[in-house]
Amino acid sequence: MSSSNVFHSVRRRQAKLGSSKERRRLLLESLEGRRLLAANGGDESPGPAPPAPYVFDIPGTGDPAVTRAVVADAQLQIWDEINNELLDQIPLDCVTEITINGSIDPDNLIVDFSGGQFGVPFLYNGAEPTSEPGDQLTLINGTTEQVIHEFADQSSGQVDLIGTDLTQTITYTGLEPILDNLLAANRSFIYSNNSETIDFSDDAVPGDDFNRIDSTAAESVTFLNPTNSIAIFSSGGQDIINLETLDSLSAFPTLIVNGGDAVDEIRLRSLNASTTATLGGDAGSDLITIGSAVGSLDPILGVVNVNGNDQDVAADTSDSVTALATTVTVNVTTGDQLVIDDSGQAVANAYDVTSTTVQRTGSPVINYATIESLQLLTGTGGDTVSISSTAASGFANVTSGDGDDQIDVLATGDGSILTIDAGADVDAIAVTLTGANSLTRITSGNGLDDVIVTNTGTQSGLAVDNGADDDLVTVLATGDQSVSRFDLGAGADVANIRGSGNQSVMGLSGDGDVDTINISSNANGTRIDPDGNLSGNLDAILGQIEVDGGGQTSPPTVADSVTAKGNAVAVNLDSGDALNISDQSSVTNNTYTLDTTQFQRVGSPTIAYAGIQLLSIETGGGNDSLTITNTNAATSTTVSTLAGDDTVTIATTGANSLLVLDTGVDNDSVSVVGTGDRSVSRVITRSGDDDVDVTTTGLASGLDINSGTEVDVVTLSTTGMQSVTAIRLGAGEDVVNVRGTGAQSFTDVFAGSDNDTLNISSDADGDRIDTN
């Protein structure tokens, strides 16, 4: 007989009465070498059938069925679990693969490994129904090193068991839930390239050591916790992975979650103390959030490691700071984002932030790497945040919420962006140093806030927005070629500027209320004493400064007057924003200039100003020269030249303005070329042999000269029409030369306690040697 194959169909009658469904087992036997012998020679029996695929159809009864597949006595057995009835069995060595087909009823196939592994591929076709409760796969009584669930879609996939004692692949289709009761060291869940939402949480029974993982594009699996690790891989697609509260008995030490390609979101809501979580974004610009749904790190009891990995979408974040038409712009790649959310906390907490870690005191550390954007959200208690460093060329944000917070910025990364939002209430923000080419933006919000800046990086940008209420800003220094901007906002704010970097620029602006800006090496204004006690110098002011008070005014008014012959000229000026500049402790001979827009110590950068109602300037203790080109109308200017043989020239003053010049001790020379109409000017020379020369004064203006002690010479060339001039001589044998006075003007000369000389003539020129 020629060689041939014959399929043998073994039919077994349905055990359950009333059913016409049959099960078939197909066996393929080779007939090669068969022959018919003579009757007296006996029959030759055929050889054993070779292994073949095994197919079993679960009978449909109209009711849910529970069917169990198990290996027993080297036999593959199929049991009806509800009726404890053996439905079929076959020697396992006769089977090359196993296929179990579900009925139209809800079926639960139990794959039982109590008798060992099946050793051949296992396929379960759940078939109908496709909606809940649907068909179920249950795995029991097995121990293995690795269980891998790989999902193809909402109802199909495969389970791979990999271990020394148990290795098995189970493929399934048409399922709804899976119950995995196997003992495993490690479990992995691999999802498809579909965009999906994956939820990992406790199952319905607390304290049973089972958890559940589900997806909008894959089968749900309820499983016994492994002893070592759980890994979740979302593969491609834009996925959301929610890591919720797990069973209280979950004790596996390692949780690995990888978002795969595309833009994914991983939300770690809870983590048991015994578990270390490693969260990875893989390709794509991913968002990883750590904190409960109500914004708390309390449920995060284990260590967290975050790695953004590669990202395909390189969205940029740009920020800039501008002052005096100079701009610093920093661009960083947003990329992968890590959000640490403790915003729901109402109690005070302390946080430490570095370029690789974030830790709330008393909580496990959160490590991160290849994260382009970091955000820390703290609660409404009085929180403390210490930022030791941030990632170079990265973005970081700290939002501390309401509460009396303390935020310390010790350093930031080069080329980075750091934004701080301190929220409402009384906050204190201290910046020790920022990175080169970096940008730091601080919003202190409402409340009595303090901002202290020790220094900033080279070519860096710093922007401070103080918000409402009375805030206090102190700047010790800024980086070379840096740009700083301080928006003082509403409230009676005080800014103390002690230094600025070489070729740097700094802008300060007020808004809404009366502000005070102090510029000096020891500027120390407070809320109680806004002007402070300035006695420093301008040596550390190495960059340009621009001050815009905003032009805010408020009572009380500044009033002063000059009276002569019973006639008075008075000014009543609105009080408002104040600018105080002091070079008092400088002992070198300096030259200064002042006009309506800027003040400068020659050889040093300019201090530009606008919207200032009260201007106060102190020069140093050397033999200084000061030229006042002009002052602003309807404003008050006070100039003190202090010690030294100083020379002051007043070209003119603003209309309806007030100028008070105090030349201090030593031998000073003051030249008043002119004053503004309806203005009041007061010159105080104090001790020393001082000279005061007046060329003219403004229309209806007032000039008061108090010559102090020693031998002083006052020369009055003329005065303005309808002006009032008063000359008050102090101790010493003083000389007054009056060469002319304006029409309808009034002039009084009050002699001092010694022998003074008054010369009245168009060429009066008495001096100390020749008083007449």
Image: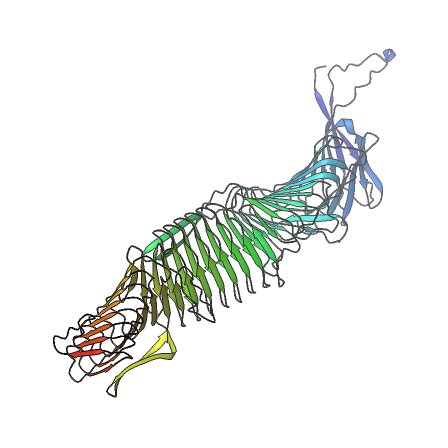
The type of colouring in the image is: rainbow
In the rendered image, which quarter contains the C terminus? bottom left
Which quarter of the figure has residue 193? top right
Task: Give 228 or 161, whichever is nearer the viewer.
Answer: 228
Task: Give 649 or 254, whichever is nearer the viewer.
Answer: 649
Q: Work out whether 759 lies above or below 166.
A: below
Q: Position of residue 145 (x, y in %)?
A: 72, 35
Q: Work out whether 747 lies above or below 11.
A: below
Which quarter of the figure has residue 605? bottom left
Q: Position of residue 425 (x, y in %)?
A: 53, 67
Q: Position of residue 598 (x, y in %)?
A: 29, 63
Task: Give 694 or 612, whichever is nearer the viewer.
Answer: 694
Q: In screen coordinates, is 267 left or right of 335?
A: right
Q: Position of residue 616 (x, y in %)?
A: 34, 68
In the rendered image, which quarter contains the N terminus? top right
Task: Give 772 or 504, whichever is nearer the viewer.
Answer: 772
Q: Work out whether 496 lies above or below 217.
A: below
